[in-house]
Image (cartoon, grey):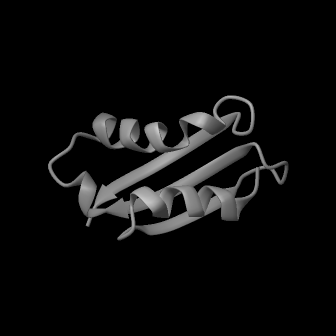
Amino acid sequence: MDKSSIEHKLLQDFPDAELQVVDLTGTGDHWRIDIKSARFEGLTPIAQHRLVYQVLGEFMPRAIHALQLNTAAR
């Protein structure tokens, strides 16, 4: 999995996002994603994370083995 694929996928569903995607191990399967979006407004952190997992679900668990999420509303 590469960074640009993750960014592209997330920006399709969160076009207003402030986004940072970091490969934590250099192996392309452990990632940290920091994302701010208006879509998270009024949602609990768990609901915010669920939205991200829905978008990236096709990559889990084969291409993305571990995912650290930091979400926030804009």
Residue at the location (32% across, 34% down)?
46
Quadrant, the C terminus:
bottom left
Residue at the location (32% across, 62% down)?
37
Residue at the location (41% across, 56% down)?
13
Asked whether, in this view, residue 39 is left or right of residue 56, the answer is: left
Q: Quadrant of residue 4?
A: bottom right
Foreground of the two, 1 or 27: 1
Give the answer, above or below, for where 47 lies relative to 31.
above
Q: Quadrant of residue 51?
A: top left
| Residue found at the very far left of the displayed protein | 42
Residue 67: give x, y in percent of width and height. 60, 40
Asked whether, in this view, residue 25 is left or right of residue 35, the answer is: right
Give the answer, above or below, for where 53 lies relative to 25.
above
Residue at the location (36% across, 63% down)?
36
Exactly how many numbered labels are in the figure? 0
Residue 21: give x, y in percent of width and height. 60, 61
| Residue found at the very far top of the displayed protein | 61
Residue 8: give x, y in percent of width and height. 58, 63
Residue 57: give x, y in percent of width and height. 55, 35
Asked whether, in this view, residue 4 is left or right of residue 50, the answer is: right
